[in-house]
Amino acid sequence: SRGGTPGSGSSSAAIIAALAAGSGSAQGSGAGSSSGSAGSGGGSAVIAPPAKLEPSASNKLDKPTAQRLVAARKLLDRYACRAARTTLQGLLAKRPNVAFAHYLMGSAQICSGQHRQGLESYARALKLEAALASDKRVARDVTGLLALRSRDTRLAALSFIEKHLGKVGHPVIIKAATNRQRAVRHAAAASATRLGIDKQIDWVRSLELDLRQLSCRQIKRRHVIDRLARHGDDPRVRKILEHAKRARAGFFRHRYRYGCVRERIKQALHALPQGK
């Protein structure tokens, strides 16, 4: 890789080529799997900078800086995440405004299980180099956090996607709006509404999950039945409401599961278009 290591004042294209050099198999096997073993130091998405970026003040690097970035990238290829962090910490102590250093630090931290810190590093990288926001590999790495058990980590990942990834993150938010975890689902729906993409959400599925997971009082307060009824042209709605009308709860199944809204369910069913 010596021939590809950028020299002093070299262009961003040469720097990126050197950073991207490394184990292609490691990158391929790790991509998108950060959620599987992020806490163990293995299995994280190993991210290379995108193949094309226009030169900017933040990615014109001197030779020593570029060499340390290449070294950190190679450590990530071997899933030596802690060692990569150490290398990047030393670099950032002297050069805090190097976008690619924060970029690789984000990958190293997520790989090490430092998920919130990783998101913060990615945010700094994108602030310094806006073109990185279009890199789908960043989206893939951050999206992997939505599969973790931690509610706070999932919500932090959603917030990052909304604030920093632009249209690249829209499909992720739309999908998360039907996530089985209630807090994630509601946060994603709110995010989609703020971004003006809420019409793309599968609202019938999202509301069906609410119906299953919320208490009767919560269902009434959130107007879940009314909101489902608005999608009456979808054939799934009748099936969902019919099931809700019949559903019973309790040890002897002696009471209706949705008793506090059962009359509203009947009204909604009666108002549905015929044949739906």
Image (cartoon, grey):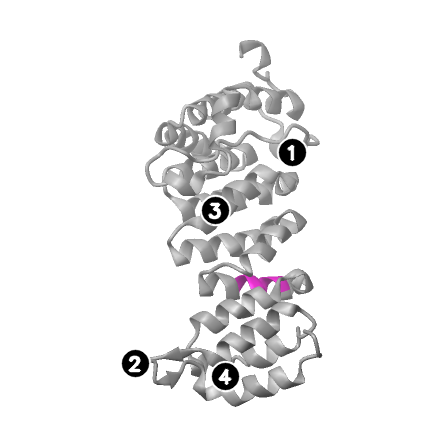
**x then y, percent, for residue 148:** 40, 50
Vertical order, 29 against 188 (above or below) = above
The single residue placed furthest to the left in the displayed view is 251
In whole angstroms, how far apart are the C-alphas of marks 3 and 2?
A: 49 Å
- Is there CB contact under 8 Å for labels 4 and 1? no
The single residue placed furthest to the bottom in the displayed view is 263
Could you say which disc has been placed on residue 48 in the image? none
> Is residue 202 visible in this depiction of the protein?
yes
Q: What residue type is labelled 1?
A: Ala
Secondary structure, magenta segment, majority class: helix
In whole angstroms, how far apart are the C-alphas of marks 4 and 1?
A: 55 Å
- Which residue corresponds to mark 2? 252
Label 1: few (<14), some (14–19) or many (≥20) C-alpha neighbours in 10 Å? few
Please tell me whether mark 2 sits on a helix, a strand or a loop. Answer: loop
**Most foreground residue, 72 or 156:** 156
Q: Quadrant of residue 229?
A: bottom right
Vertical order, 77 against 200 (above or below) = above
Question: Magenta segment range?
Answer: 187-192
- Which residue corresponds to mark 3? 119
In whole angstroms, how far apart are the C-alphas of marks 1 and 2?
A: 70 Å
First-in-chain label (4 vs 1): 1
First-in-chain label (1 vs 2): 1
Q: What residue type is labelled 2?
A: Phe
Label 3: few (<14), some (14–19) or many (≥20) C-alpha neighbours in 10 Å? many
What residue sits 44% from the left and 61% below the top?
A: 181
First-in-chain label (1 vs 3): 1
Image position of 128 (left or right of 246): right
- Is there CB contact under 8 Å for labels 3 and 4? no
- Which residue corresponds to mark 4? 220
Label 2: few (<14), some (14–19) or many (≥20) C-alpha neighbours in 10 Å? few
Please tell me whether mark 3 sits on a helix, a strand or a loop. Answer: helix
